[in-house]
Amino acid sequence: MEKIKNGFKSIIKWIVRGAMYLWFKIYYRAEIIGLENIPKDEPLIFCGNHRTYLDPPLMVCTAKRHMRFLAKDELARNPFFNFLGWAFGAIHVMRDDKDIAAIKESLKALKAGECIALFPEGTRNGIEKGEKLKDGVAFFAVRSGAKILPCGIKGGTKEHRKVTIKYGKPLDYSQYKGSKDKDVLEKITR
């Protein structure tokens, strides 16, 4: 039964990724830069800026790596987003709370060699709204030793339809692995 379920998930992911990729390339004239910076065989923490609802699917369909997004728990209330979350292995997080289950699941995924993705802004356009960056990316990097892969996205709006996604070189903070120092988390977050 588990094999059938995983096979179904794989088919769904393949169809959805392919359709989204075509949509981004045709409608948004997506430019993808830096794919060579994405290691193929190690755990990564994808860390992107969050401007629009397009950012997560853009990362999912262009990175050529399976990633599990940390997504706000409210998305699970929508049947369509809940289904996609199930298919893509989303990790639902209760925002503004130390969600221990989500933290454990994220660390388990990194330990298994998987990738997770999150936005340090915590919400769309968080920096523009004056919100302080969250230290979740730094926390997972320090706890797991996984590298952080910065991802910058621009465009994809009514004013600038062409979208560009740029993957930077992985950042290695493994020298801080296991540290519980808040200053270290703040330094990495900056």
Image (cartoon, rainbow, N blue to C red):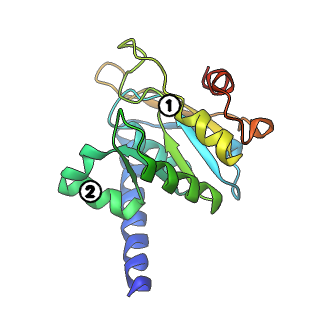
Please identify the residue farthest to the right as the structure is shown.
Answer: 175
Return the residue at label 2: 82
Task: Report whether residue 95 is seen.
Answer: yes
Q: Foreground: 178 or 38?
A: 178
User: Is the residue 96 above or below the residue 109 in the image?
Assistant: above
Q: Residues within 10 Å of mark 2 (few under 14, many from 20)?
A: some
**Residue 170 placed where, x, y %?**
71, 38
Q: Foreground: 153 or 89?
A: 89
**Residue 100 placed where, x, y %?**
45, 48
Residue at left offset 42%, top offset 57%: 17
Residue type marked 2: Asn
| Secondary element at tag 1 | strand
Q: Residues within 10 Å of mark 1 (few under 14, many from 20)?
A: some
User: Is the residue 45 above or below the residue 152 in the image?
Assistant: below
Return the residue at label 1: 164
The alpha-carbon separation of the residues under discs 2 and 1 comes to 27 Å
Residue type marked 1: Thr
Residue at left offset 36%, top offset 56%: 19
Q: Foreground: 175 or 128?
A: 175
Query: Residue 7 vs residue 34: left or right?
Result: left
Quadrant (top left/top right/bottom left/bottom right) for the N terminus: bottom left
**Residue 115 placed where, x, y %?**
58, 52
Say which label, 2 or 1, has the lower sequence index.
2
